[in-house]
Image (spheres, coloured by chain):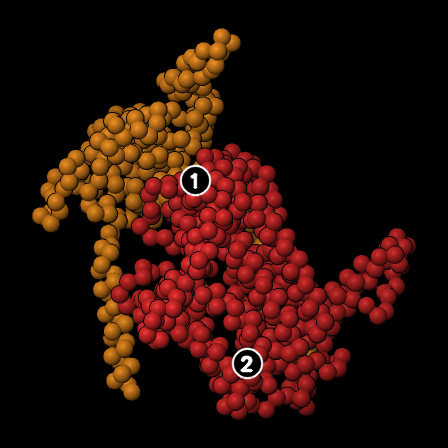
Chain colours: A red, B orange
Amino acid sequence: MATKTEFNNPVIRWVDERLPVFTYLDHEYNQFPMPKNLNYWWNFGALASVALVVMILTGIMLAMQYTAHVDLAFESVERIMRDVNYGWLLRYIHMNGASMFFIVVYIHLFRGLYYGSYKAPRELLWMLGVVIILLMMATAFMGYVLPWGQMSFWGATVITNLFSAIPIVGDWIVTWLWGGFSVDNPTLNRFYALHYLMPFVLFAVVGLHVVALHVNGSTNPTGVEVQSPRDTVSFHPYFTAKDSVGLVAFLFVFAAFVFFAPNFFGEPDNYIKANPLQTPPHIVPEWYFLPFYAILRAVPDNFIGAWMGFTLISAKLAGVIAMFGSIAVLFLLPWLDTSKVRSARFRPWYKWFFWLFLLDCLLLGYIGSQPAEGIFIWIGRGATAWYFAHFLVFFPLLGWFETPKPLPTSISEPVLKEDS
Amino acid sequence: MRMKVLVIAAAFLAGISTAHAAGEKIELPDVEWSWEGPFGTFDKAQLQRGLQVYTEVCATCHSLNLLAYRDLAALGYGEEEIKAYAANYEVEDGPDDAGEMFTRVAIPSDRFLPPFPNENAARASNNGAYPPDLSLMTKARKNGANYLYAMMIGYSDEIPEDVALMEGMNYQKYFAGHQIAMPQPLYGDDIEYADGTEATLEQEARDVTAFLAWAAEPELEDRKSMGIKVLLFLGVLFVMVIAVKKAVWRNVKH
């Protein structure tokens, strides 16, 4: 914020001289230089922030009508659906909004992977993004418990039980998390409190993510840094216009689900009130957790033991470590990728590995939705191995063995060449 | 190498097909329902017939806890008709000024009166089985409407040899495991429709399914008609933002 912006409006000038919010907005969202070659894959960060705001607004309105008690929660949600004015609309937006949020964030993440957005000097920006995904997962998980349907209850039971895998203190931690000896009213109450709190924490981390973004600016499809003003255009009107296109397309898809297939992403079992005495035949998490669920179930019994000749940790603990490790490894990515070149456009081998990794994640998602039996177990193990190999083996090696294609000297160069 | 790939692929496919065989897949009948598709709506005459089936048959054992009598206005009934319908039931109210509980005639704001006072009473009257509440049934099962319809029409006296019925169970070809505690509820001609429609088994089954689909999603018509307007609006807006974007970017080479 080196130079202050001059404003004609005296009120704005008065405020800005004392608290430069308008100068800040002008710098960051009006004049801010953006690489002019960004494609539509760069829309998804803005879309994710819109999704977050939609979730917070609908969530606050739902919270005014919802009752967090095991005897009343299920009925209170149905009251919202039936008796609250446009309650069905609010709830379906919130319910499908969670899926939409994950879709745009996952696309945003894979865009970062393809174009190497996590490399220096944007490591912290990337790591804040991983924190955002973790917060989203925790928030979504707790939110799914609130309607107190069968999947809410049994999902909560399965996931909180994971902590019992921690040696020595595991059972004690689970009792502490539950606030009792099973998932019950205290659990529902604290999940509600945390589900209301965490989106605001998320909002703050998104703020940091944006601040970190605006230090070095966006990457771009060539992966070559901006070198001169010739490479950039101002945020407004160029990217406000371009983001609007993506935003309206996103809202169209969002609305199509809300109005015409509102339960597409949901499980029918969650329209049955929670019953602690009756386990559903298939406990499946929401679709956005399926790849991680597959990794959790992939670790075979005595996997570590078979290697070392004795049992060091249980399969359950190993599974939990693998599941959390699958996210934790993302934190290390900026240092695991040894290539000097950012964009997969100029990395002939990495490009293939990127698509294979995407397929691997989709395969893991499919395995996560299937019962853990027969061939699915083996496919799940193979896909899990590939997942970790991608980060721990392929990324470091590719940087050494791959010969990148020649990079353009600047963002403008390919365009100017076409011209002459 | 190629041989190896083929072997792995074959093993993969074989594994998938056996895994599917393990959990037997039941093919449900596929009925064309009036409320399907983006422009689908409920047929009020059908919902009224379905209410009659529910009232005269299903309500003997199944509750409809999430519905109030006033909700029947959506079926095309007037205030007086709803009052008269509710007046068929007596609910406990109170305490009165003397601290006593009393019974009174149900009014439109009351919820549908359940057939049993609690789960234990329901189980005691039904051979230990608990007839589930029907308010959300079409949303609480995969392919809910067809499932519900199949539950009505899937009974048969001819029991296949490989099905060993347990005590008090009934053969139902569409139910998982093919045995269900619920005895066949509809046979055809169980009721006399107020509108004179012939009460075949399929007719009754379709009507009560429609009624319960409405009970599960009373907002469906509002939702779809609003959705059409929202998508039209966004469609037009999309064309406009594309035009704006093109105009803004026309002089930028990128």
Quadrant location of the N terminus of chain A? bottom right
Identify residue type, mark 1: Glu
Between the residue at mark 2 and the residue at mark 1, the CA separation in whole angstroms equals 51 Å
Q: Residue A219 at what x, y percent from top left? A: 64, 76
Q: Residue A199 at what x, y percent from top left? A: 60, 53
- Marks 2 & 1, CB-CB < 8 Å contact: no
Identify residue type, mark 2: Asp
Place residue A313 in its image quadrant: bottom left
Query: Considering the numbered disc 1 on the image, is that residue within a helix, a strand or a loop?
Result: loop
Q: Residue A392 at what x, y percent from top left? A: 48, 78
Residue A160: mark: none
B82 on left or right of A204: left
Q: Residue B11 at what x, y percent from top left? A: 25, 74
Whether residue B198 is visible to the viewer of this picture, yes or no, is no
B156 on left or right of A29: left
Query: What residue does disc 2 label?
Result: A337
Q: Chain of mark 1?
A: B
Q: Chain of mark 2?
A: A
Does B133 sit above or below residue A284?
A: above
Query: What residue does disc 1 label?
Result: B217
Place residue A117 in its image quadrant: bottom right
Looking at this rendering, what residue extends furthest in the top direction? B98
Does A360 sit above or below residue B172?
A: below
Asked whether B194 or A70 is in front, the reply is A70
| Badge count | 2
Picture residue at 64% right of the left edge, 70% below the top: A125
Does A159 sit above or below residue B110?
A: below
